[in-house]
Each structure stands twice: as C-alpha cells, then as structure tokens.
C-alpha cells in the first residue's frame, strides 16, 4: 500500500543527490546520499515486510521526504556528511571518540609558533600530531624535540611578560627555547625552526639523524667540540623518540590502518597511525547503530569522521572496501591537497604481508574497544543508577525499578509459540531467575502475551516475599497492543504495585497502557540502552528455547526411524546447524552427511516432509 506522502516515482530525479526523511513534527529522521535519487528512494517505498527491522521503523515513522540534486557523487558525499553533523538525525549513526587523547600541537598560525599539548583540535592553522595514549608521552616527546628544535612553548602571557622585561624564561637559559621574545632569533628564523619541528614530526625519517651525525663528525674534524657535543645530544634525542615507537613495517611507509568490529547494536573503529614504518598513535571510536547499515556504509562514514580535522596519508588500509570507495578516495585527496600535501589517497585492502598482519592487530583493538564500550555501559554503577532514575521519572513511577522483568513472544510462522522472561536487578541481569514458557495455542501475539503475563503473575504473587527487591515493572517487547494485553492480565490478577510498559520497535519508544502518545527517551540515554539490552536478552532467550524445542522434536521424530540412532541425529544437526535446515535439506544434501546413505536419506525426507519429494 502506498502512503499518501510517498512521491510519484517519475517526480524523483535520476541525478545524484542527498535526501532527508522527516517525521510528523518536521524533525529530520535520516539523511542519505545516492548516485541516482530515483533508484535509491524507490527502495524505501516498497513493502516494509522485506526491509530490515530498523529501516522499516524509520520509513513507517516518516511523513515526508525531500531531496537536493548535486552535480556529482563527490558533492553528494560532502553534503551528506555536512548535514549529518549539523542535524544529528536519530537514524544516522554518530561516532563517539573513546577518550580525549592528547596531541602534540604547533600553532603555525601565530607570528611566533608555539609547541604545546592539546586535548581538542581546532581549525586555526595549528598542526597536530598523535594522538598519544598518555599525556606524559607527549610531554616527554616535546621535551626531547625542544633540545633539537628550540621553538617557543610558553603561554601568551609568559611570552608577553618576557618581551616587556627583556628577560627570557628558564627554557631560554637552558637552550630549550630560541628566545624570540628577547630577539635572540628573528621571527623568520624562529618560523624556520617551527617548520623543521613540524617536518620531523610529519616524516620522522632517519635522514635527519644521519644529517646530525654528519654535522657532528664535521665539527669534530674542525675541533669544534662544543658544537659536536650539541649535535650529538640532538641526535640522541631524535633516536630516543624513534626508539619509543615500535617498527611494524619494513618499508618506511606512511599509512593509516583501520580495523572494524560490530555487534547487533554497536560498532567500533580502531586506527593505527603508521609513519615511517612505525606506529605513531592509536585511536578508536564507538557508535550505536540505530538504522541497520551495511558495514561498508558504516566504514565510509567512519573514514569521513577520522579525517574531518586531519589530513589523510596517501595510503589507507581497511579490512574491506567501504561504500563508494573511489568517490571517498577522491574526497580525501582533495582534503590532502588543501593542506598542501602531495599525492593521491589510495584506499587498499591488504591481503598478505606485514600490512595484513598489522590489520589483524588493529581489528583486535576494534573488538576490544567494542567489548569495553558494551561492558562499560552494562556495568557502570553510576550509569545504571542514572538509567533507573530516568525510567522512574519518564514513566511516572513512584520509585526506581530496582527489579524489573522483561518478556518476549517468539514463534515460527504462528507455530511453536514460546515465551521468555528475563530479570534485571540494579540494572544487571539475574540469569538464575530467567524463565521459559511454552504456549500451546494463541490467535496472535497479544493473546500469547496475555497468557504469559497471567501465568507469570500467579508465580510472582508467591515469590514476592522472598525477593531481595520486589518486581515493580514489567517490560514487554511490543507496542500498545501487547502492552494493553499485559495490562488486562495484570488487572485480572488483582496484583498491585506493578507497572507495565512496552518497548516498540519503531523509534524504540515506550508505550504505557491506553496511552495516545509514547514516551521517547533520548537516543543516547542510559535508560534507553538498559531497556534495549533487556529486550534483546529476552528475545535471545526466547529464540534459544524455541530452537531447543525444535531440536528435541526433530530428535524424537528421527529416533523413531529404524537404523537412525542418537549419533546420526547429532551428525545431522551439527552438519546443517539447525532443525529447520535439516527439514529444508534435499536428498543430495542429506547424503553428504557422514553415515547417511541414500536409503536413509529418503526415509528421513519421507518422515520430515511426507508430502514432498526433493531431489
């Protein structure tokens, strides 16, 4: 069925462009780009039954779409990124840097450039290097570099005071500042020092060390031992910096290596900045994926975020090709040229050698970042407490739901109906209290939910006196129909002190019984993360029980066949992965299972699917 707001297909241009979906309140839900707007948008205006769950939610929530035509795919990429940053639509992913990593910065936009430690990056001509994992590493590197390139490192107030008093600070006296404040070097000479500082941090190659060795030897031949000692100390400082970075690539390559990891609700990106064959910095980002996006699309947006402030190297290694890889490479090349760096950007998927080995390490870092992100959100006591308090306030509960239960219904085409119940206390799962429910028959999900809640409330009335915390909230997986069914069961039971709420899969909105409007929690709130986690846990538990039941049913059916024992049944399930796959197997596929001959395979087919014969 076509919604009244869907544009006529012929009215949508075939040019490249950027489109925006809006809800009934004119809020932007999603921003996307397309090589052909008509081809891309037409995929949203078909039946939502074949769409991924969250994509269908976005389309069902939308009430309007508009588009902007641009000249090229490259322009579309730029405009999409700009609008996502500006409007922060709820169905577009938003990357979060995992830490405020420190950088070594040089303020090249000032008359007298200054070297300093920075936590944030600003587009004011400042050159940034890093990120470093520890602030002391930045300070140590800066201290070593100042003995070679003695640029100013003081604050503006200190520099102004030294100029007024015509007296340099301590760094000027010990040779770690060229003291432009008192005229020991001119502005041009000081800028040359800053350029050399930036040049070394950019390249960090061995030629600078070799050059200092030559200067040291030449000074020794002239018997200028004071200069020779200075060159020696500078060489030692640069060698010390180099030794602190592990050599990972035999070729002195400049490359950024990006790793990727994802789960159902989150994704993580890790990056190693390799310069001159050595790792100079690491960084990672995490994101909660609202709309189901292909990993290639997430990776494309991640790369855009990585180089929003920094110039990219000429080579970027990725675990798989991002969406619109050629267009993305062209965009990054333009960014590189704008910072006066030469060479085109190439996006590569390493297959073998040192870079492929390093990609494995970076991917492991992404997996660790993802695990840490999910573990932190699950086990941070402050976050859990805040989540429970937010649920209390948003749902109008008399107190925070220190113990709540979440239920889900699962079935296979209306058959094999099962229910699950999971329990959370203090925001953490209590797996010993999980329960399964077998439901013999039900007309639909609402009747199944009524049966499940009714049965649970009978036991809950008996268990309440033995609980550490009484259950005060029941969360159901579903919208208003499921919530109203649960509320009827609660009213029929006569049990008091319980609230019911549903988590709908549309905008992840919360529905109270007989309410005209849902409760919308902020997308990045700890409360929403907690109820999503409970809903997903209930869904997982229900599916596991349903698969277990199907396996037992299949096992019982097959065991009744002559000549098929437990080992052959186990071999069938192991080979195909699930009872459903065994039922769907052809004769030829069954014969490939060790120990299953053609006669046995035919008997299995006849038993599991008596009305079908599949060759």
Image: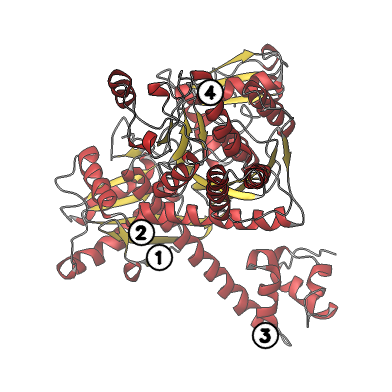
Tell me if label 3 and label 4 are in contact, CB under 8 Å: no
- Camera-side residue of 89 and 81: 81
As helix, strand or loop, the secondary structure at mark 3 comes to helix
Disc 3 versus disc 4: nearer the observer: 4
CA gap, disc 1 to disc 3? 29 Å
The mark found on residue 452 in the picture is 2
Residue topped by disc 3:
567
The tag earlier along the polypeptide, 4 or 1, is 4
The tag earlier along the polypeptide, 2 or 1, is 1
- Camera-side residue of 481 and 10: 10
The image quarter in which residue 81 lies: top right
Residue that sits furthest to the front in the current view: 223
Disc 4 versus disc 2: nearer the observer: 4
Image coordinates for residue 509, horizontal then vertical, percent: 37, 37
Residue topped by disc 4:
189
As helix, strand or loop, the secondary structure at mark 1 comes to strand
Image coordinates for residue 545, horizontal then vertical, percent: 48, 67
The answer to whether 360 appears left or right of 309 in the picture is right
Q: Is residue 461 above or below residue 336?
A: below
Rate crowding at label 4 as few (under 14), some (14 to 19) or many (20 or more) other CA atoms within 10 Å. some
Residue topped by disc 1:
437
């Amino acid at each position: 069925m076509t919604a009244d707001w869907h544009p006529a297909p012929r009215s949508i241009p075939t040019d490249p462009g950027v489109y925006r979906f809006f809800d009934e309140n004119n809020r932007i839900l999603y921003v996307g780009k397309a090589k052909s707007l008509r081809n891309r948008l037409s995929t949203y205006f078909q039946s939502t039954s074949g769409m991924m769950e969250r994509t269908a939610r976005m389309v069902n929530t939308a009430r309007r779409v508009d588009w902007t035509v641009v000249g090229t795919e490259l322009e579309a990429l730029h405009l999409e990124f700009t609008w996502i940053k500006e409007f922060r639509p709820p169905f577009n992913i938003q990357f979060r840097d995992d830490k405020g990593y420190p950088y070594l910065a040089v303020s090249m936009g000032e008359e007298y450039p200054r070297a300093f430690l920075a936590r944030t990056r600003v587009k004011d001509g400042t050159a940034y290097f890093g990120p470093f994992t520890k602030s002391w590493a930045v300070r140590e590197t800066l201290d070593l570099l100042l003995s070679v390139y003695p640029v100013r490192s003081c604050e503006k107030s200190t520099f102004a005071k030294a100029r007024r008093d015509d007296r340099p600070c301590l760094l000027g006296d010990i040779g770690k500042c060229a003291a432009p404040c008192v005229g020991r070097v001119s502005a041009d000479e000081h800028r040359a020092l800053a350029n050399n500082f930036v040049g070394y941090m950019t390249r960090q190659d061995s030629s600078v060390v070799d050059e200092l060795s030559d200067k040291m030897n030449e000074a020794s031949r002239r018997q200028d031992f004071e200069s020779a000692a200075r060159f020696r100390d500078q060489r030692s400082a640069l060698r010390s910096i180099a030794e602190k970075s592990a050599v990972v690539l035999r070729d002195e390559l400049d490359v950024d290596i990006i790793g990727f990891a994802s789960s159902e609700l989150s994704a993580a990106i890790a990056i190693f900045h390799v310069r001159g064959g050595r790792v100079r910095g690491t960084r990672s980002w995490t994101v909660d994926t609202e709309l189901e996006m292909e990993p290639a699309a997430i990776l494309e947006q991640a790369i855009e975020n990585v180089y929003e402030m920094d110039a990219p190297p000429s080579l970027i290694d990725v675990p798989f090709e991002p969406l619109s890889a050629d267009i993305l490479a062209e965009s990054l090349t333009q960014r590189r040229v704008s910072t006066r760096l030469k060479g085109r950007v190439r996006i590569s998927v390493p297959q073998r050698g040192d870079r492929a080995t390093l990609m494995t390490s970076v991917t492991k870092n992404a997996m660790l970042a993802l695990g840490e992100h999910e573990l932190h959100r699950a086990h941070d006591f402050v976050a859990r407490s805040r989540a429970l308090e937010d649920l209390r306030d948003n749902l109008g509960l008399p107190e925070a739901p220190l113990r709540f239960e979440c239920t889900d219904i699962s079935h296979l085409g209306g058959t094999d109906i099962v229910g699950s119940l999971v329990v959370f206390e203090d925001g953490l799962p209590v797996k010993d209290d999980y329960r399964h429910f077998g439901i013999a028959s039900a007309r639909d999900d609402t009747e199944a939910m009524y049966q499940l809640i009714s049965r649970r409330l009978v036991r809950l009335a008996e268990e309440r006196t033995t609980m550490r915390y009484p259950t005060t909230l029941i969360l159901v997986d579903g919208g208003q129909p499921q919530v109203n069914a649960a509320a009827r069961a609660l009213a029929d039971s006569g049990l008091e002190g319980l609230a019911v709420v549903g988590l709908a899969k549309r905008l992840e909105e919360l529905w109270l019984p007989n309410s005209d409007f849902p409760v919308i929690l902020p997308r990045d709130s700890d409360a929403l993360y907690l109820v999503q986690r409970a809903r997903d846990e209930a869904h997982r538990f229900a599916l596991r029980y349903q698969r277990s039941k199907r396996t037992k049913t299949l096992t019982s059916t097959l065991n009744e066949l002559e000549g098929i024992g437990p080992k052959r049944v186990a071999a069938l399930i192991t080979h195909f992965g699930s009872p459903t796959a065994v039922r769907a197997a052809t004769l030829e596929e069954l014969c490939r299972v060790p120990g299953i001959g053609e006669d046995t395979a035919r008997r299995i087919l006849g038993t599991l699917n008596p009305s079908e014969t599949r060759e």
